[in-house]
Amino acid sequence: MLQELPGLDQVTLAQRVGLDTSTTADIAVRLEAKGWIVREVLPRRQRRLLLTQEGEKLLDELIPAIDALNHGLLDGMGEEDAQALLRLLRKFVHLNNDQSRAPLRSSGSSSGSGEETLAG
């Protein structure tokens, strides 16, 4: 997500991926220690997250492998069944989103329903 939205703050990132803010902060500290991101302090103690060149390189190496794994998981199902499974999983997550400790939220959503994030 940081590759698509450079400079995203930790709280917004947590909301978009469905993690609580303390978990997101802990992960950010560890990624920064590995040299994959930098955290810039913003007003009101917020932190902006940016990928480093090393982080960009790592993502460029990992994304094709992750895509291949995702496609491989659904290969034996056929396209129609795979799409039906993904649609039902999105619906399941959406229907149970508000019960989560950290509901998914899209950039324009304050309701916590996650509908915008999970649609499609």
Image: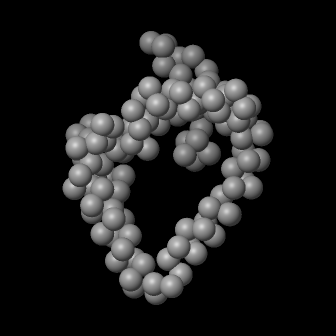
Quadrant of the snapshot with the C terminus:
bottom left
Q: Which residue is most to the top?
A: 44
Specify whether residue 12 is in view. Answer: no
Q: Is residue 67 left or right of residue 61?
A: left
Model colouring? one colour
Seen from the viewer's position, the closer of residues 71 and 108 is 71
Q: Where 101 falls versus 41 (above or below)?
A: below
In the image: residue 53, left or right of residue 24: right
Q: Is residue 30 shown left or right of residue 87?
A: right
Left or right of 93 in this view: 48: right
Query: Residue at 53% of width from left, 73% of height from top?
Result: 73
* Residue 49 in sight from this viewpoint: yes
Residue 93 place in picture, x, y as percent: 30, 56
Which image quadrant for residue 66?
A: bottom right
Q: Going 58% across and 75% down the picture, which residue do you hit?
A: 72
Residue shown at 67%/37% (left/top)?
51
* Image position, residue 16 (x, y; %): 41, 42
* In this view, 65 is above or below 76: above
- Residue 78, given in percent of the width and then of the height, sits at 46, 87
Residue displayed at 46% across by 31% down: 23
Of 40 and 20, nearer the camera is: 20
Q: Quadrant of residue 52?
A: top right
Q: Position of residue 90 (x, y in %)?
A: 33, 62
Q: How many marks?
A: 0
